[in-house]
Amino acid sequence: MKKLRIVNILILLLLLTGSCKKYVEGYEKDPNGLLETNIEQITQGILLEQQFALKDEGLRTAMIWLNQATGSQRQFLSFNNWNSVGNNQFDGPWGQLYTVISEARVMEDLADKAGNEKSRGLAKLLRAWAGGELAELWGDVPFSQAGLPDQFPDPKYDAQADVFAQVQSLLDEAIVDLNGAKIIYGDKDIFFSGDASKWIKVAHGLKARFYLAAGDYSNAKTEAAMGPSSTDDDMYAKFNSYVAPRGQWNPTFQFYWERDGYMSAENSYGVQITMNGGRDNAKTYEIIRAYYNYAPGSWWQSGYDYDLNVMIADWVGTNGKFGGPMELVTYGEMLLIQAEAEARTNGVAAALPIYNQYRTLLDNDNYLGHWGPVLSSNLTPPYGFYLPYDLTDFQAGGIENQDNVSELQAFLRELFEERYVFFIGDYQAFNDYARSFNDPDVPQYFQLKSGFNGQPLRFIYPQSEIDSNDNFPGEAPKVTVPLPMYQ
């Protein structure tokens, strides 16, 4: 009887096994996975993934920490205290950047097999860009083995300095490839319609950015001069607001739309330094750029004094930064990099003409026009103003040196303050604080929220990475621990 029962069980198991096999037949592959594609299909997808990776939830956290925005309700109240943000908060930003790296690997391989140098160069540029951003935000990260799950299911961690070096080499390769034959599929290139010369300038701009992050000022200056050389070269994330399909919305606009009240700009230092005249002096008037970044709460009917400006022209006569396209790599950034690099290597007198060139750009009607000419029509002079500085302005007693620090310190303080405002809505503001924290030549240039321990100097490793990568290097550093290259 016992034997018969065992035989019956075995027969039943065989029947079930066969039935299960038939039941799942044809469904073995993940329909959401990247199974089969071609260069043309993957180009647009990876570009969209990349712009969201740079402007999505991680950026909003960084802005709150830097006092450019404020957590106002529910869990976002706790985000004001950088010590209370948990590892899970960074699963998304980390995953988005590594998705770019993985997809760039696939695109690289496809382009290589097709002999399409330009598309291969674009793939290398995007992989390098994601790797540089990871190194800026987290420090030591997987890069050399990242995006190759079959070979390296648990990719090793590369030192922050090594990642920057690998990124520079990869960007060099990208520039060579972008000068090659074949094409970038123009109808899929949402930024430059297949114009490889524009992408080459972006590659040089990224090299300048990451050389600056690594403290290599000579190379940063050289590369910035080969980056975007006019506003025609500027690269903007192609976002929109409610007038477009939902998938095209600016991520912060969508956040405001779906979680109204969670985040604002109430009592933020960003508002204080721009909207409330904190940077204004005899040569600077910030009101128009202030309205580009921030808006009175009454505009959004939020109940707060100020919000991030998610408006569009149809509503109040101005385009807010967070209601439409957002800067990614621009001519303005290149001038700021050149000015800082020149000041650090050859002094303020050599750097000042470059910085004044940047200020002239701010004062240009064509540049500021999209920031709200309706609002500025009654101002004198219109559009605010950014008059040239003199060397005496940075010497003891000058309008930018009332506390009598050194000339270089006064200039770098003004420059970093300008970058703090220019990069509202960009990770570079966070990276600036991380790299300047232990730099004696950069005095305090903005105010963090008070009452919290330490300073936010890095992103913390996501829980998903800690749990899944056997090569994760032990205990995760806290947010207040400087990144390896800035200790």
Image: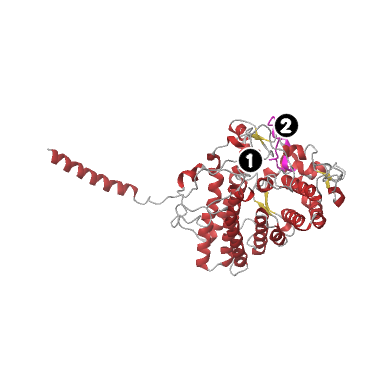
Look at the numbered disc 2 and give the secondary structure of its residue. Answer: loop
Q: Name the residue under label 1.
A: 456
Query: What stretch of residues is rendered in magenta?
Result: 292-312
Q: How far apart are marks 2 and 1 (CA)?
A: 25 Å
Residue 415 is situated, as x and y percent measured from the top left of the image, at 76, 49
Q: Which amino acid does label 2 sit on?
A: Asp
Q: Residue 481's image quarter?
A: top right
Mark 2 residue crowding within 10 angstroms, few (<14) / some (14–19) / many (20+)? some
Question: Looking at the image, is mark 2 or mark 1 earlier in the sequence?
Answer: 2
Residue 137 is situated, as x and y percent measured from the top left of the image, at 60, 47
Residue 393 is situated, as x and y percent measured from the top left of the image, at 85, 48
- The chosen color scheme is secondary structure
**Left or right: 9 as drawn, with respect to 428:** left
> Which of 145 and 60 lies nearest the eye of the viewer?
145
Decide whether residue 147 is among the magenta residues: no
> Which of 121 and 396 lies nearest the eye of the viewer?
396
State the quadrant of the N terminus: top left
Q: In this view, does 347 lie above or below 58?
A: below
Q: Mark 2 points at which residue?
A: 305
Nearest-to-viewer mark from 2 and 1: 1
